[in-house]
Amino acid sequence: MTPMIHILNGPNLNLLGRRQPEIYGRETLDDVAAACAAIGAEAGLETRLLQSNWEGQIVDWIHEARESAAGIIINPAALTHTSVAVLDALNTFEGPVIEVHISQVHKREAFRHHSYVSHRADAVMAGFGVHGYVLAMRHMAHLLG
């Protein structure tokens, strides 16, 4: 059975490519899904990209990943800075977790400098644009190899 990687995306990432393109670029989540699937195929991994604006849905997907995923790549978006619930859910997951941020959060507002998710993440990609997802997929393949 091919190992599955869940790629979870938080609030407002459904607008990727249309929302603040000067910060987040013009590529969409569909572009991210295609790029991650291609890297996954090279590495013998399947991918499942999901997005929700609801914290509880993200928590539910993390719980599902406990049964079906070898690893999680997560861009929690604004939940990064606020959600102990997402952190607690990630702490129940036994595989590798990689946190992704499209922008360089440390060059932005001070409240974006703190991440609850980083307390669980095995790696953090920030400031690489959507290419950070590709880097995360390559690193996930390395971690699982």
Image: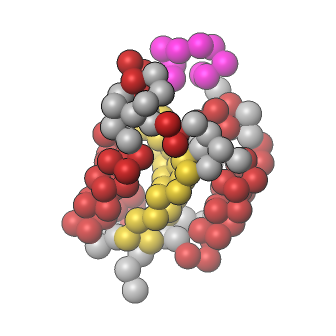
Q: What main secondary structure does the magenta stretch of the protein show?
A: helix
Q: Residue at x 55, y 76 (%)?
A: 68
In the image, farthest residue toward the front: 18
Is 142 situated above or below 130? below
**Res. 96 visible in picture:** no
Please determine whether, in this image, residue 64 is positioned above or below residue 19: below
> Looking at the image, which residue is at 67% across and 38% down?
79
Say whether residue 61 is magenta.
Answer: no
- Residue 42: x and y in percent read 22, 66
Which quadrant would the N terminus be assigned to in this image? bottom left
> Where the C terminus falls, by quadrant?
bottom left
Which sits in the foreground, 68 or 25?
Answer: 25
Report whether residue 67 is seen. yes
Q: Position of residue 59 (x, y in %)?
A: 71, 56
Identify the image quadrant of residue 26: top left
Q: Residue furthest left?
A: 42
> Which of the two residues, 57 or 41, is positioned nearer the viewer here?
57
Which residue is at 47% across, 58% downward? 49
The image shows residue 136 at horizontal and vertical percentages of 38, 49
Magenta extent: 105-113
Residue at image x 41%, y 46%? 29
As drawn, the residue found furthest toward the bottom would be: 1
